[in-house]
Image: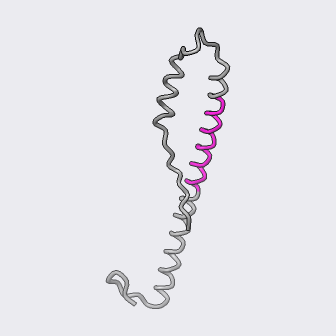
Amino acid sequence: MQINGKLYTEPQLAAYVKELEGELKEIQEQADNGKRQIALYEDESRKLKDVLALARSEVHRPYPEYKYRWETELEKLLENETTVYHEVAD
């Protein structure tokens, strides 16, 4: 059989397929590890947002509409936040 201009015997072809399957498995494992890491980061981000929301609700304000500088910066940060983890249905 000929693949990409190279002629393979049956044993060579079997070895080539096994090599490609091994590479595919390795790439899939790397992708899965990446997904897990992103999920951990997003979970950590969610927990930090919860803590910030709690802190924000308990901070004393000189008057009701007063905003601390950290609150303004936090709003800017959260406004521009995006997620990179999107699970695709098979």
- Relative to 17, residue 24 above or below: above
Q: Is residue 54 above or below residue 33?
A: above
Residue at x-position 64% and y-position 13%? 60
Q: Between residue 47 and residue 11, name the one nearer to us.
A: 47
Residue 38 drawn above or below residue 58: below
The quarter holding residue 66 reads top right
Q: Residue furthest top?
A: 62
Q: Is residue 63 left or right of residue 72?
A: right
Residue 79 colored in magenta in the image: no
> What residue is drawn where x is 49% and y is 31%?
77
Front-most of residues 6 and 82: 82
Q: Magenta part of the protein: which range?
A: 33-52
Residue 48: give x, y in percent of width and height.
62, 33
Identify which residue, 18 or 27, lies in the foreground. Answer: 27
Who's the residue at 62% across and 46% down the image? 40
Residue 35 magenta-drawn? yes
Please determine whether, in this image, residue 27 is positioned above or below residue 36. Answer: below
Residue 18 image position (x, y, % from top left)? 53, 78
